[in-house]
Image (cartoon, rainbow, N blue to C red):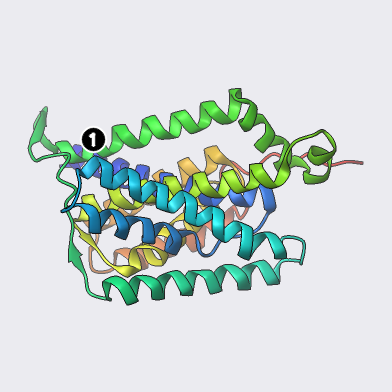
Amino acid sequence: MFIQHLVNALSVGAVYALIAIGYNMVYGILEKLNQAHGDIYAVGCFVSFSLLDVVHPVIAVLIGCATGFVLNLIVERFAYRPVRNSGRVAPVISAVGIGYVMRNIIQLIWGAETFSFDLGIFGTGSIQIGNAVVGKLQIYILIIAIVLMAAISLLLKYSKWGQAIIGISQSIETSALMGIPVNTVIAIVYGVGGLLGVIGGLLFCQYYQFIFMGIGFSYGTMKAWMASILGGIGSLKGAIMGAMILGLSETMVAAYISSTYRDVFVWLIFIIFVIVRPQGMFPAQTAEKI
């Protein structure tokens, strides 16, 4: 049973990591919390959900990802960019407002009820590992998430755009003077965050077999925020490790303590960790000029 719980925990943590990466990348560049992150990608998830009976599931997923990408580009241009240099309060208010708008759009079009969800891609079945029986879905989710996280890490480290993102995270003004198209790069970061969020949201819905309007804020923004704080906000490695720890904590608490009070115990662990190590496990490295 422990192996089964461990695979489940890693699968959930990997989904949270995909959601947290985009959230953490925005903070790493602008040092601003994107409180609308979950609600924006939730729209993309519902678009894919609506298209499952119309087109092939893979095409539905691609259209949902494109929706999350484009929607985040639009929101960044018209809601975030005008208040980017207006201190910390104005961007937060703008993000919270966008989150409410997206949530109400979902409620207006799809309603507030919970729907059963199945992409119809992964199939059913299980794999025997020793004495444990592990579902193939968990293995597929884990593999997809690991491949995407590795691809993002490699792109950030070795590609021209990745180096531009790292440069902007260190200094927006200096990067602009070096010829980096700052606004374009920041918009791409928002768009990629939305795309990864849709993928993570769809995998989450596939794992739990349901979708509803709360998957954005409750299971997206809040989980990404917790994972970022645990791992070290502004750090890509921290976001991934924090998400894994969050998934491990949720699964093991539900399995060995109580599924009813799972969130209570997880929040207690989170609060204790923040008190002991508020900077997170892998805080972002920042250069200090003296």
Res. 237 in view: yes
How many numbered badges does the structure rendering display?
A: 1
- Quarter holding residue 278: bottom right
Residue 288, percent from left and from top:
83, 42
Rendered position, 101 above or below 254: below
Determine whether the residue tagged by mark 1 lies in a helix, strand or loop: helix
The single residue placed furthest to the right in the displayed view is: 290
Please give the name of the residue rendered at 77% of the width and 45% of the height, measured from the top-left corner.
Answer: 172
Res. 256 in view: no
In the shown orientation, is residue 162 left or right of residue 169? left
Q: According to the image, label 1 marks what residue?
A: 140
- Residue in front for this viewpoint, 117 or 33: 117
Within 10 Å of disc 1 (Cα), the crowding (few <14, some 14-19, many 20+) is some
Rendered position, 5 above or below 92: above
Amino acid at dot 1: Tyr
- Quarter holding residue 161: top right
- Residue in front for this viewpoint, 273 or 179: 179
Q: Split into 4 quadrants, where in the image is the N terminus?
A: top left
In the shown orientation, is residue 271 left or right of residue 67? right
Residue 30, percent from left and from top:
68, 52
Please give the name of the residue rendered at 22% of the width and 50% of the height, measured from the top-left corner.
Answer: 206
Residue 15, percent from left and from top:
35, 46
Residue 231, percent from left and from top:
53, 46
The single residue placed furthest to the top in the displayed view is: 158
Rendered position, 204 above or below 40: above
Please give the name of the residue rendered at 62% of the width and 65% of the height, measured from the top-left corner.
Answer: 79
In the shown orientation, is residue 88 left or right of residue 123? right
